[in-house]
Image (spheres, rainbow, N blue to C red):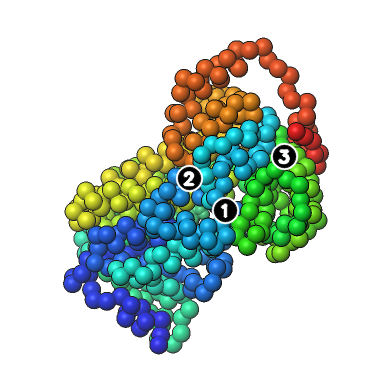
Amino acid sequence: MSHLHRMEEQTRGSAEELRRAVVIGGGIGGMMAARVLADHFDEVVVIERDHIPPGVENRPGVPQARHLHFLMKRGLMVVEQLFPGVRADLLAAGSHLLDQGTDFRILYRYGWSPRVKLGLELITFTRPLLEATIRRHLLPHPKVRFVEGFEVAGLSSRADLSAVTGVRIVPRRRGEGESEEQILQAELVVDSSGRTSPAPQWLESLGYAAPEEAEVDAFWGYATRIYQPPAHIAKDWQTLLVMNRPPYQPRAGIIQPIEGGRWLVSLAGVMHDYPPTDDEGFLNFARSLSAPDLYNAISQAKPLTRIWGYRRTSNRLRQYDRLSRLPQGFVALGDSVCAFNPVYGLGMTLTGLEVEELARCLRTSDGGRTLDPLAFQKAVGKLVTAPWALTTGEDLRWPATQGGEITAKVKLLHWYIDQVIRLIPQSPEVFLAFQEVNHMIKGPESLFRPRVLFRVLKQALAPAKAAPKTLPVPATVHAGAEARTSTVTLHR
Ligand SMILES: Cc1cc2nc3c(=O)[nH]c(=O)nc-3n(C[C@H](O)[C@H](O)[C@H](O)COP(=O)(O)OP(=O)(O)OC[C@H]3O[C@@H](n4cnc5c(N)ncnc54)[C@H](O)[C@@H]3O)c2cc1C
């Protein structure tokens, strides 16, 4: 049976007979959105361009999936609320639920994180395991159809262009008679097709303005490899994270436990200091981090995979919320609207919060019948504002960063966050405040609560201490994009 016919069979009836929503993209945002739409529509069709592999495997549509992925506490809460049991299933499959305090060793700019229980857990996995687990919970839903191997090529609209009426679909693998485009009608179309979403062009072709884009790029790159840990290793961590040190030390690395008792090791470099993807280069890069612990650990471990690289890491925001009009029946969320530099691990959690907002809008708009797309995009814009300011602000610490502006507000933020990070090694309370913001349990304003503010001011007013002599400044890094540092230096 052809893909086209199979899809026609899979998508029953027409939008006149039933209320149908279409979700573009079956990634994390798409699956979460489908779940909330199913509470209001008769049918929800998820169109995914990839053919989904049978097991827990990578697929071409989410190239980022080979690299470090975890869910912050807030993100896990959202996923678990939408799909009760996902957390237990992940743990049963070998995921790790880790306390951000006791299970982590984190080397910040001014020293190691305190070993205290924070009550902020994050869950680790490979991204394919997360996707496969959520998919297993979504697919049995009687109202959800997951259509694989079809790509959305555009939107269809009313003759007067006032509303989107569906999507134009083409099969990914075209066989005989399958090159034709098909229109799938829908009352609501949700774009969750990720960072490369062509939705702005689709809107333009309907006579609407494309959203303006803001981009801040610090030129981060990742290299990732999975290891079998050594049978015996003296360590006091589950996850080891060695941070970089702006503006001097551009390199960072992490060892994260994943399913199968394995380690996922990601190295990251900023300002074009991309980690190499060959054996020797990868190890040398690991050796050049600000502490030798990560290198020591992986040099005793057995590589299980090749090394994968990734460089599409800019912060990119499409300002749908600033448009003066949008057609009825179309909204966008997830990376399609705002894709962050992944180093901060925010993307899936924020996408989850946007889906929660979609659920709220559906509840207050008669199940989507009177949904105002601009109001939804404005709400998404509000959710994105603080994380955008924090992540781009951090990236603006690096001299090679393109886009954005170092305003007085950014300078103040740099100073304040730097003071907070300086306090972390000696203050469990400040560490908790910092991580509550990272986990999106509290907003960034909580970093200014009196007890934290007081400590920051006390520290700032104290006579300046000499910079920690164990953190040297590799002089070569300032030389520009090609610069490399090889000194290993910070010890506990
Ligand atoms: C290296 C890296 C590491 C990351 N680590 C983390 C982390 O630790 N924690 C975290 O929370 N976030 C992390 N992120 C961010 C996270 O991957 C994204 O924020 C998240 O996947 C966004 O979900 P989405 O549904 O918007 O897009 P995606 O998950 O990218 O899904 C988009 C889907 O749409 C499909 N698609 C695209 N175009 C079409 C089309 N025309 N028709 C049909 N289907 C289409 C794609 O095949 C894909 O399945 C990381 C990102 C990167 C790059």
The number of discs equals 3
Residue 237 sits above or below residue 445 on the image: below
The three-letter code of the residue at mark 2 reads Lys
The Cα atoms of the two marked residues, 1 and 2, are separated by 13 Å
Say which residue appears at 59% left-offset and 38% top-offset. 101
Nearest the viewer among 487 and 42 is 42
Q: Position of residue 75 (x, y in %)?
A: 45, 48
Nearest the viewer among 92 and 12 is 92
The Cα atoms of the two marked residues, 1 and 3, are separated by 39 Å
Reading the image, the residue beneath label 3 is 480
Q: Position of residue 298 (x, y in %)?
A: 75, 53
Q: Nearer the viewer, mark 1 or mark 2?
A: 1
**Which numbered tag is attached to residue 73?**
2
The quarter of the picture where the C terminus appears is top right
Counting residues from the start of the chain, the first of labels 1 and 3 encountered is 1
Q: Position of residue 473 (x, y in %)?
A: 76, 31
Counting residues from the start of the chain, the first of labels 1 and 2 encountered is 2
Q: Is residue 395 visible?
A: no
Say which residue appears at 33% left-offset and 77% top-offset. 10
Secondary structure, mark 3, is loop
- Label 2: how many Cα within 10 Å (few below 14, some 14–19, many 20+): many
